[in-house]
Amino acid sequence: MKYYSTNKKAPVATLKKAVEKGLAEDRGLYMPETIKQLPESFFNHIDEMTFPEIAYTVAEAFFGEDVEPDSLKKIVYDTLSFECPVVSVSKDIYALELFHGPTLAFKDVGARFMARLLQYFIRQEGLGQVNVLVATSGDTGSAVANGFLGVEGIHVYVLYPKGKVSKIQESQFTTLGRNITALEIDGTFDDCQALVKNAFMDTQLNQHMILTSANSINVARFLPQAFYYFNAYARMKALGRADHIVVCVPSGNFGNITAGLFGQKMGLPIKRFIAANNANDIFYQYLKTGIYDPKPSKQTIANAMDVGDPSNFARIYDLFHGDHDEICKTISGYTFSDEQITEAMATCYQENGYILDPHGACGYRALKEGLQPGEIGVFCETAHPAKFKDTVEAIIGAKITIPERLAKFTKGKKQSTQMGKDFSEFKSFLLKE
């Protein structure tokens, strides 16, 4: 499989190059040249398959030309050591719980898969140390840090905005040490993302060290998230509720929903998607106006979605050949204030006894407002509510039990390097490494 840049000015790349480089030379995002259709027989029997079996079929369509079958199967099965169940929340609305991995967030699958795929290529090619740069608004940093922890031949640098991630999120990537370095940036997530992108384009840095990214700009990070949507369909089919499914995805950098759209292009029978935003409503405004107008990100209680210039918009735009009308036929949008998110969390708990995190609350509320008669709604519950313990408890008026695997992070010692948002400072730091 070859990969082209969304900016159409860089040479096509192999999967290995796309994974190792992350970003194309023209600053575009890599896209696979073809999206393979999966056979009807697969969907007919998908409800009889396990999550890893489903994921391997999907992974083979994406990566089967480039990774030896036994190795790909091992990568998939090593990645999926946990389930992602569908849970009934209210009439015709289900939560796809994506928080049962090591860091209790949906990004665990993409991070673990990428770590193992990158290691596969490192061993094949005999590369030296590969350095992963990742900007995070919350959950990406913890998922990547834990997915890559102790992986030989790889060092991870996590850039995060000072004071703008929850304490539990911060503890998941600042207490690890070993091959994980946390950089506390005095700025926003957009500033962190800009530092990463500028590093990829800097000739001197790229001559000094091998750089790649584990943000959703990397094809090996975002494509495996398609596994979730096939699994959701399988579980809904087993319940006899697979007709007219609408999937709502709380969206920040738009990697997760883009993976779902790829699944739909492969034949997955999802009727339509809803992108649920917090106050960072850039995509919502695009749907309304046809104009993409990035803005500085705003801080909200759904912090992992605090993105003012979502990278994966380029992939969505490319996937639909820039046709605004076609995008609007497939994706609708909602945007919610902190007050509306809070109301959704409180109401859902009171009415259904289900505890939402702030991100899942956006998805739940969008379905409550946007589901049409005859449709079945599934929203992505992207992180365990305990990751936002203080916020959630204050809203629902009840205590949340912190899972042991999450609690252990809070007992570690914070190790981070504080840094400004100026690229020259970041570049100097990396050149000394």
Image: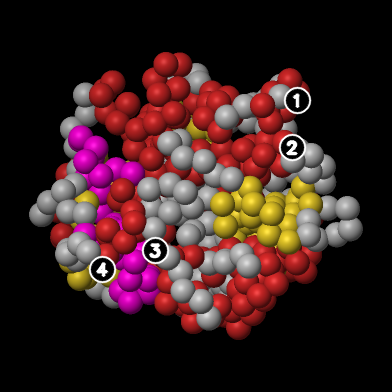
Q: Secondary structure at mark 4?
A: strand
Mark with earlier residue (1, 2): 1
Q: Residue at x 71, y 24 (%)?
A: 45
Amino acid found under the numbered disc labelled 3 = Ile
Give the mark toward the camera: 2 or 3.
3
Front-most of residues 323 and 148:
148
- Report how far apart the C-alphas of labels 1 and 4 lie in the structure: 48 Å
- Report how far apart the C-alphas of labels 3 and 4 lie in the structure: 25 Å
Q: Please provide percent x and percent y for residue 130.
A: 24, 39
Q: Residue at x 29, y 43 (%)?
A: 148
Q: Which residue is mark 4?
A: 184
Q: Which residue is mark 2?
A: 237
Residue 172 magenta-drawn? yes
Q: Secondary structure at mark 1?
A: helix
Q: Residue furthest left?
A: 432
Give the mark toward the camera: 3 or 4.
3
Q: Are marks 2 and 4 in contact (CB under 8 Å)?
A: no
Q: Residue at x 72, y 32 (%)?
A: 267
Q: Is residue 390 visible?
A: yes
For the magenta stretch, what is the residue range? 147-175
Mark with earlier residue (1, 4): 1
- Report how far apart the C-alphas of labels 1 and 3 lie in the structure: 39 Å
Q: Which residue is mark 3?
A: 402
Give the mark toward the camera: 1 or 2.
2
**Does residue 80 sit above or below 386 in this rendering?**
above
Q: Which residue is mark 1?
A: 44
Q: Secondary structure at mark 3?
A: loop
Amino acid found under the numbered disc labelled 1 = Asn
Asked which quadrant contains residue 250, the reply is bottom right
Residue 346 magenta-drawn? no
Left or right side of 229 for 385: left
